[in-house]
Image (cartoon, rainbow, N blue to C red):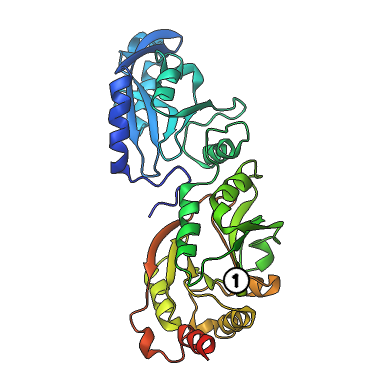
Amino acid sequence: MKTSIAGSAQKEELYGNINDLKERFPKKIDGFFNSKLGSFELDFIANNEGYISVHDTFVGDWHNHIPMDQWKSFEKELRRSWRNEFRFGHDIAFLFPHHDFAFIIDSGRFEYIPKGIEVLKDLGYVPVVKRRDKYSTQWGLENQLELLSHLRSPDLVEVKAADTRAKAIVNEVLSNLPLEPEHITFAVYSPKRKKGKPYNPELVINPVKKLIKVPFIWRDETLESVSKGLNLERAVGLTSLVETNSGIKHIPMLDFTCRDIGFVHLTLEELGMTGVVVASGNSYHFYGSSLLDEIEWKDYMEELERDWWEHYSVDNNWVKLQLVQGYSMLRITPAKRKLHQPCLIEKYEPKQVSGKDDSLAKRVEYRQTG
């Protein structure tokens, strides 16, 4: 499960990319430490978030670079460092194999790598130098937003704005439906974080800014075109609205609040629902593999709202918001306040559907077959 905006790769999966980098880049480079020329060791570090950091470490004798009257205080600072040794360095670039993108965060230091930019291009990366008005070398909120900004930039046509994980969600959900849709609908909206208690729905989701009806065969291209140039405050969601040759239908959806996927499975067993489970970052989303007509969808959502205490892992405020807007919607891209990229987890099928005569699945089946 990888919902990091940086990429979906596990740490171990990045080692192949690192080997390619080590073959092309020098082991040591020259640079300046305290205005004096020194030697730096170049290394490539795989991170749990799915990216590679290019790290340089000073390997000379620091006594030759620091005035003698500052030795004692400098030595004390080094001992406090996370390395706990007389070596130091910092990240000068972040590489994102998932996006084929390279983010130069210290162009001054990176310039000491002979033909560094050219090598990155040869390896398939699109290199971009970070804006100088912000200068953090940590993988935190600032650089995550910077990455999202570059991915969505209309000027970087070589870089895809829509993550392959978003496209995989859409394609998997649609492939499991009983009918191939003629059109689906995306929504552009501004997600907000939950703030404080009680849980105020207005603090969670703004009204949808725009609905985009899309021919089924153009879904990937449309998702990319909508994401490119999109304001960082906004995200793209997949709505429940599906147009088929039998009219407008709805995909049953669920937005969970729990972190334990066991509660997700328990709820799906109780509802008797088959479909796709998606990790959203802090919890999970669910897309059913059946299609509901307008009356069935409304009955389904009203049941969730009415019997919320039976399905307490489902976000009841989300249910209320969907009923107000007349369709369900779940986020499939990141945004400024929701930087996790949703990703597929599993296709789930309840073990005891046949014995649940009162389940949603049984009621829908009975209604559709008469």
- Observer-nearest residue: 273 or 339? 273
Question: For the point 44% across and 52% down, which residue is it?
Answer: 3
Q: Secondary structure at mark 1?
A: loop
Task: Work out whether residue 114 can be spotted.
Answer: yes
Quadrant of the rendered structure where residue 40 is?
top left
- Observer-nearest residue: 206 or 177? 177
According to the picture, the residue beneath numbered tag 1 turns out to be 245
Q: Residues within 10 Å of mark 1 (few under 14, many from 20)?
A: few
Quadrant of the rendered structure where residue 274 is?
bottom left
Q: Position of residue 261 (x, y in %)?
A: 39, 68
Q: Left of 322 or right of it: where is 135? A: left
Q: Give above or below for 113 relative to 353.
A: above
Q: Left of 123 or right of it: where is 184? A: right
Q: Position of residue 176 (x, y in %)?
A: 44, 67
Question: For the point 44% across and 28% down, which residue is it?
Answer: 93
Q: Position of residue 287 (x, y in %)?
A: 49, 68
